[in-house]
Amino acid sequence: MTASVTLVLPAWVEEVVDDRGARVPGRLGDDHARMGFVLALARENVDRGDGGPFAAAIFDVTTGSLVAAGVNLVLASKVPIAHAEVVAIAMAGPSLGSYDLRIAGPTELVTSCEPCAMCLGAVPWSGLSRVVAGARDEDARAVGFDEGDKPGDWAAYLRRRGIEVVVDIRRSESAAVIRGYVEAGGHVYNGARGSV
């Protein structure tokens, strides 16, 4: 059996990128501003009904400019691994011309929620230098999302591999996006719970 998977970001992502000036070096010059951009993507993904309440982006650490954006595409694509972090990492490779994101120098993943078990594994494999997270694992679990089995101190795991980790950036806003999605009737898509 032959199959193929193509992940395509919704067209509105370009509008958010352009409106926020995310490609302009230095425009989103700190963790707070970059997380604001990611949260705008997460909110828009929910508002437009394109997927879950998660978004992520890869930035050049030195210039602060956007390398690639990602939103959760699990529901839209029917691809179980299309989490926002994996989508952003997947989009960054072709953008940089390499599977190793270090080719551009230090790159960072800014994600609206700390990585689940799957996304955590993708971080060191991709060559990222830094991870910035908004909501915590417990914020996602509190409304029913399964974050998988990962090390209790996942940040220490990444730090041992030379990856800087910053947590709780705009945590309350990030957690509110997740809660709002579920409270509005958004589907909590855990593999063990069946399909839509």
Image (cartoon, rainbow, N blue to C red):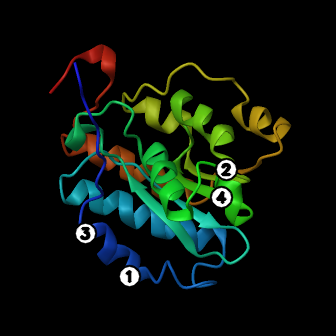
Tell me if label 1 and label 2 are in contact, CB under 8 Å.
no
Q: CA distance from mark 2 to mark 3?
A: 28 Å
User: In the image, is residue 50 above or below residue 96?
Assistant: above
Residue found at x 47% / y 69%: 37
Q: Please tell me the numbered disc located at residue 167.
A: 2
Quarter of the figure with the N terminus: top left
Q: Residues within 10 Å of mark 4 (few under 14, many from 20)?
A: many
Residue 17 percent location from the top left of the image: 40, 75
**Left or right: where does residue 10 sit relative to residue 130?**
left
> For numbered disc 1, what is the local secondary structure?
helix
**Left or right: where does residue 96 sit relative to residue 103?**
left
Q: In the rendered image, which residue does mark 4 sit on? A: 108
Q: In the rendered image, which residue does mark 3 sit on? A: 12
Q: In the rendered image, which residue does mark 1 sit on? A: 18
- Mark 2 residue type: Val
Within the image, what quadrant is residue 63 found in? Answer: bottom right
